[in-house]
Image (tube, grey):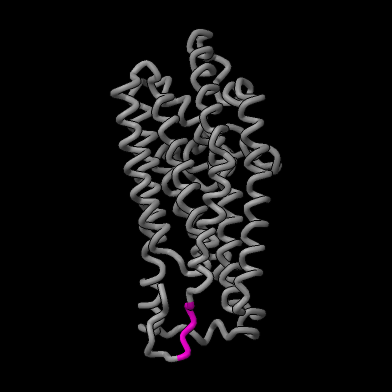
């Protein structure tokens, strides 16, 4: 509605409503990219409003008094910053490095490489976003059991999350290989000239194979990262993620461009895969080392700082 306005396609037909009719009724003109930005802001506001309504709702307020704890508590804010800054740095850095990967390292080789890269990226997102949800769930569950002084249960739940993520992302990786031509072709308009269509399918298929190669490693890395955060082990994983991203994605991507130019954008995808494998190895080693089991975030003395 916001992007196309009165000229919108029948994207809302399954609701029995025309998107163009909605735009005309509301007096919304076609805004293009600006409309996409406004829609993103509105969607983000709704994304905030839903959990906020649950958090402040009667059920949680009766159980936990969520409406009463509105005053800022500087000691607790300091604790949150001390524990949370590595995770914030990690996620922000991931956005920068993956953005550079897509916009420069892949798109450097032309429009066809950029288009095929974004197609592969969409399927990669379809694969890893549910695993991100599992990672968040593991953060909460591991934190709960660590608070109960049951690191044994925390470890079992973390490995359960890893198994679930591996099954899902493994199946996605299998689909990326078996149905790669159909998956890429789904995003290519029918009126695309045959030579351009063949080139896009060829490039996109190769990128999907590269993506499939690191699916299981990505599943392990994401879930264990969430488990470590839940235990309060944030600094080592966060810092190592930043170092690995700049060294392997960015540095490795430039190295592939320089030493293996014939691979073109596929070289960058190989570097991205190497980053995922490296990160998986680092986080797996950290988790198996067991340091996270001894971290205590809850303080008996309010003047003490939590372990980090």
Q: Which residues are magenta?
A: 296-300
- Residues 4 and 51: in front is 51
Provide the major secondary structure of the magenta segment.
Answer: loop
Q: Say if 44 sits above or below 125 in the image.
A: below
Identity of the residue drawn at 39% across and 55% down: 90
Residue in front for this viewpoint, 215 or 121 = 215
**Please, which residue is most extreme toward the front here?**
289
Q: Residue 24: in sight, yes or no?
A: no
For the residue pair 55 and 209, the one nearer the viewer reads as: 209
Quick check: 145 above or below 99? below
Inspect this view and state whether residue 270 appears.
yes
The x and y percentages for residue 115 are 45, 25
**Residue 278: image location, x then y, percent:** 44, 43
Question: Does the segment drawn in magenta span residue 297?
Answer: yes
Left or right: where 127 falls relative to 299: right
Would residue 193 be found to the left or right of residue 158 on screen?
left
Question: Is 222 on the left or on the right of 115, as rendered?
Answer: right
Among the 4 quarters of the image, the one containing residue 305? bottom left
Picture residue at 52% right of the left edge, 48% below the top: 26
How far across and how far down the image is residue 286, in percent?
A: 48, 58
């Amino acid at each position: 509605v916001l992007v196309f306005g009165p000229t919108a396609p029948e994207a809302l037909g399954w609701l029995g409503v025309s998107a163009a009719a909605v735009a005309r009724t509301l007096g919304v003109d076609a805004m293009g990219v600006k409309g996409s930005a406004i829609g993103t802001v509105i969607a983000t506001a709704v994304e905030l409003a839903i959990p906020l309504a649950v958090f402040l709702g009667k059920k949680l307020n009766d159980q936990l008094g969520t409406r009463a704890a509105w005053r800022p508590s500087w000691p607790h804010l300091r604790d949150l910053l001390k524990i949370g800054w590595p995770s914030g740095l990690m996620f922000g850095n991931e956005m920068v490095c993956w953005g550079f990967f897509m916009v420069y390292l892949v798109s450097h080789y032309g429009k066809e490489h950029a288009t095929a890269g974004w197609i592969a990226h969409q399927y990669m997102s379809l694969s890893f976003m549910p695993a991100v949800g599992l990672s968040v769930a593991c953060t909460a569950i591991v934190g709960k059991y660590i608070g109960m002084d049951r690191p044994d249960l925390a470890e079992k739940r973390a490995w359960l999350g890893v198994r679930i993520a591996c099954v899902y992302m493994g199946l996605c990786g299998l689909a990326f290989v078996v149905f790669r031509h159909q998956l890429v072709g789904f995003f290519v308009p029918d009126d695309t000239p045959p030579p351009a269509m063949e080139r896009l399918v060829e490039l996109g298929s190769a990128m999907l194979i590269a993506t499939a190669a690191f699916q299981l490693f990505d599943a392990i890395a994401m879930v264990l990262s969430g488990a470590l955060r839940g235990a309060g082990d944030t600094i080592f994983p966060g810092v190592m993620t930043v170092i690995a991203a700049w060294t392997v994605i960015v540095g490795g991507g430039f190295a592939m461009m320089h030493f293996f130019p014939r691979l073109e954008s596929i070289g960058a995808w190989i570097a991205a895969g190497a980053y995922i494998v490296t990160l998986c190895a680092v986080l797996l080693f950290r988790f198996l080392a067991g340091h996270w089991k001894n971290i205590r975030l809850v303080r008996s003395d309010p003047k003490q700082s939590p372990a980090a």
